[in-house]
Amino acid sequence: MRLAVVAAGFTPGEADELRRVMTHKRSHEKLAEMKERLMAGMEERKIPRPDAEAIFRQLLGFAGYGFPESHAASFALLVYASAWLKRYHPAVFAAALLDSQPMGFYAPHTLVEDAKRHGVEARGIDACHSGWECALEGADPGMPPAPGRIPALRLGLRYVKGLPRAVGEAVLLARRRGPFASVEDLARRARLSRPWMERLATAGALRSLAPDRRGALWTALGLAPGEEGDLFAGRLPPEPEAALAEASAAEEVAADFQATGLSERAHPVSLLRPLLAARGARSARELQRMRDRSAVEVGGLVIVRQRPGTAKGIVFVSLEDETGIANLVVMPDVYERFRPVVRRAPFLLARGRVERNGKVVNVKVRELLPLPFAEGVRPGSRDFH
């Protein structure tokens, strides 16, 4: 840009236009259209034609690599800073990414699982402790983290699906006046209608007031509707306590995913581990220690499906379990045989062989099967089209 201003007399605005042209995918064509303006400007400044032509050729050459080079430098700095934060402040890194969603490559549940594998305690959404955004806590819920210790990650109310920010702010405003004594107290003081209380209960966000999700939902359903002016709003009718069946671990995790898109309680695949172990399937961590060309079975939750245009029909699938991520390579012929499974199954069991290239470990797949799980678990993943 400075060269265009000094050598060709471009205004700052014209120089910025030149910069945009040089970053265009058809930069050489666009630059050719600007050549006469550049040459005329350099002629006015007594720059010989051969020298002006040489300068223009340099601009053409820079357009071929300058923009990618600058992006590479920026990306390198971003990667370095991100890696440093993740290494030394994993909870801060996770909270920042979660509060910046939607973005990036991985869904929120994968970010939470990665944080847990790096020593961060993940705490669920809680109307008594969560802010709207995700936040950091000390050993005691709601307290600031102690210096020198990895803080806990508290998930924010923003992850309750369908909950407007105004409703979340109403909860926070009421809580600042004092802790909630009960589910009814929360509904009354925050002036939440029955549907919003149901949503909080379904997401497990009433855990400090009613530890059992089903009990919390039963209580929320029993609240008066909460219309404007209703004297009974946020109050329960007198009735005996209901004896509700206890939910299984799989049902709890499925309910978390259905209501929030993630679960801090357990990774879904950890609940399938006995089934996987019985058939000899390896975890993502075990896969890293296996020899090249070894036969292997690996099961997990699909978090990424990719079919790049330059990969000649090869599909890449990433499976996540409670120990890490396993990368699958699905060749075109295998993909055609198992297309419905590859495209739709949220949980997969893959059979194939280990392929090692230095520290990179993949599984070259020969067969794929869907893995069953509780109804309602449909986690987000990056899918191909």
Image (spheres, helix red, strand yellow):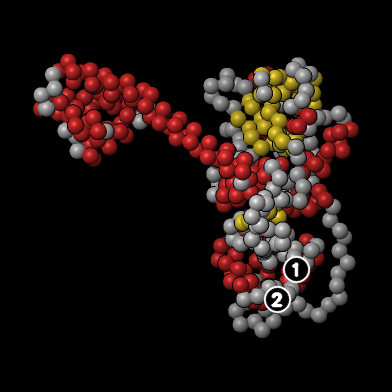
Q: Amino acid at mark 2?
A: Asp
What residue does disc 2 label? 185
Q: Quadrant of residue 31?
A: top left
Q: Quadrant of residue 246?
A: bottom right
Q: Is residue 58 above or below residue 236?
A: above
Residue 231 visible: yes
- Secondary structure beneath dot 2 equals helix
Q: Is residue 351 above or below residue 105?
A: above
Expressed as whole percent of the image width and height from the top left, the position of residue 224 reads 70, 76
Disc with the residue nearer the chain's start (1 vs 2): 2
What residue does disc 1 label? 209
How far apart marks 1 and 2 lie (CA) works out to: 10 Å
Q: Look at the numbered discs 1 and 2 and tell me whether their residues touch, using CB distance below 8 Å.
A: yes
- Secondary structure beneath dot 1 equals loop
In the picture provided, is 227 more to the left or to the right than 34? right
Expressed as whole percent of the image width and height from the top left, the position of residue 166 reads 55, 66
Residue 349 visible: no
Tell me the residue at 78%/32% (across/down): 283
